[in-house]
Every structure is written in structure tokens, then in C-alpha cells.
Amino acid sequence: MPELPEVHALAAFLDERTRGHAFVSLRVAAVSALKTFDPPLHALEGRTIVAVRRHGKFVDFDAGDVHLVFHLARAGWLRWYDEVPATPVKPGKSPLALRVRLDDGSGFDLTEAGTKKSLAVYVVRDPVEVPGIARLGPDPTAADFSLADFRAVLAGRRTQIKGLLRDQSVFAGIGNAYSDEILHAAKMSPYVLAAKLDPDQVEHLYRAMRDTLAEAVAEASGRPPAELKDAKRRALRVHGRTGQPCPVCGDTVRQVIFADSTFQYCPTCQTGGKPLADRVLSRLVK
């Protein structure tokens, strides 16, 4: 799933190439992807793109009083074309969800692999009309998101820190991969309760979060969409690296499997050398 750093780079790429251009056509191939009906999709045609912005993991095309917003979900992606194919868009079983053409012939496809379709497209008058955007917490990379703000968010929350970092209503844009990376950098167990962190641990986690995301944003910046996935995978230290040596201590990276997701961690760096039992709400194996 693309997270804050990749979506940030994607929005910047699209802003550079589409700002000042007008939508010519928008064709839906997967009707289930379109989550709104008023304004209609064709209301965007002929409108000039003012800017492309990121809200958490959402990309927002600002066309004045109408916005095209999309969320790529777990298996969605964007394919950019300098010249959009002339082949007609037909609903069916292909990965294609939406094709967008601009006034200079360029444009993009939104695609989604697999059978579980979660990619979402919205046409709205204001981005906050998108429920997922309206619920977003603060952007953890924002210049004005301070340590004091971070402390206030964590205070009193008897929630495991892994789940809290991933909660979009708490921190906008962090997902499964970067929460693993942040906790590894902080040398912290995914299962520790936020409310039990002492002031020094909170500051250490804040610095790890800011540094990890800043490094990932820098790594993704300037890359075209086709390169972002591979660049992310290469840079990850523990996420997706089960069975490989930890780049910090050399211990074997382990994983915990849940019903619909997994996460990875280093026992030596994060849990005092003890493996985490592989079940929901697990505690350290004694």
C-alpha cells in the first residue's frame, strides 16, 4: 500500500505535470471505484487543474470549485502516460478503474490488482466532503507538528503503539510499512501501550517518526510513479524482510501474522530478544 512518502511524491509529480492543464475526459472502467454522484464525473471536463495536493494517503486534484480525489488503497496504483492510449475504456475484469486524459494528450490510469477492490475515487466540491479526509488526524511531517503536539496525542491512550501509529484519525498517512520502520528506529515493541511511555521514550519515538518519514520522503521525491514501489522496498529495513538479518544488529527479522495483515520487527532491537507470539493482542512469550 502506498503511504505518506509515496503519495507525497506522487502528488508532487502530478502537480508538476498537470497544473495549468484541463481535464478533457474521465472514463470509469470499475463503477465500484466511484464513490460519489454529485457533482458527476463529467463536471470536471473542461476544468483547469489549479494544484495537486496530498491529504494523508489521498491525492486531491483541485480544479477550482470541483475536486477529483482518489485513494489507492492496498493494491491500487497510478500509471502515467505522456500520451494516453486511444483504446476505448470498457468495464470488465481488467485492473483498470479510471482513465484520465488532459488537454495536451497526457494523463493517467488508476489501476487495482487482485479481487478485493478498495480503490476509491471521489468528485466533490471540497475535499473535506470525503469521509476519510474529514477524519484525518494531524500530518506527522508538518513543520508545525511539534513534540508537544505529539505528547498530547499520545497522552492517556491505552492503545498499542503500532495500531496507534497506523490510525489515520490519529496520524495522517502512516501505514503498516512505515509504522514498522518507525518502531524499529525507535527500538520499541509494537505492543507497548502509548500511555505507558515515559517522557524520554515519547521524545525518542517522535524523533524516530520524523526522521524515518523525512528520509522516506527524500528517497521518493522526484521519482516517477513507475519507480516508487521498488524504491520503497529497497529502503525498508524490517518491513517485508522476514527471515533476513536486521541491518542494525544482525538478528533475524521476525513477523506477526494477523487475519488480514502482517508486521515485521527485530527481537534484539525492539523486544529485548524475546519473540512476539503470533496472535492478536499477544504478549511476549515468557
Image (tube, rainbow, N blue to C red):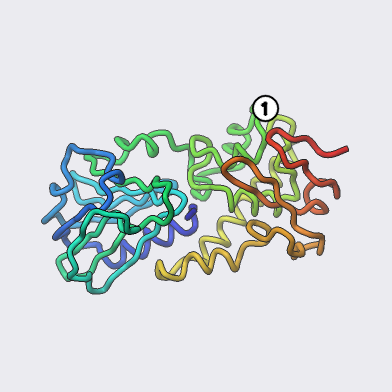
Disc 1, SS: loop
**In the image, what residue occupies the spot 47% across and 59% down?**
6
On the picture, is 63 further left or further right than 116? left
**In the image, what residue occupies the spot 40% across and 45% down?**
118
- In this rendered view, identify the residue nearer to me: 83 or 212: 83
On the picture, is 198 further left or further right than 82? right
Which quadrant of the figure has residue 248?
bottom right
Which quarter of the figure is the C terminus placed in?
Answer: top right
Neighbor class of circle 1 (other Cα within 10 Å; few <14, some 14-19, many 20+) is: few
Give the total number of marks visible in the rendering.
1
Residue 176 can be seen, yes or no: yes
Residue 233 coordinates in the image, percent (x, y): 57, 64
Task: List the residue tagged with mark 1.
Answer: 158
Residue 229 coordinates in the image, percent (x, y): 49, 64
Which quadrant of the figure has residue 197?
top right
- In this rendered view, identify the residue nearer to me: 86 or 149: 86
Residue 122 coordinates in the image, percent (x, y): 28, 43
Q: Indicate the amino acid at tag 1.
A: Arg
Asked if 190 appears above or below 182 in the picture, the reply is above
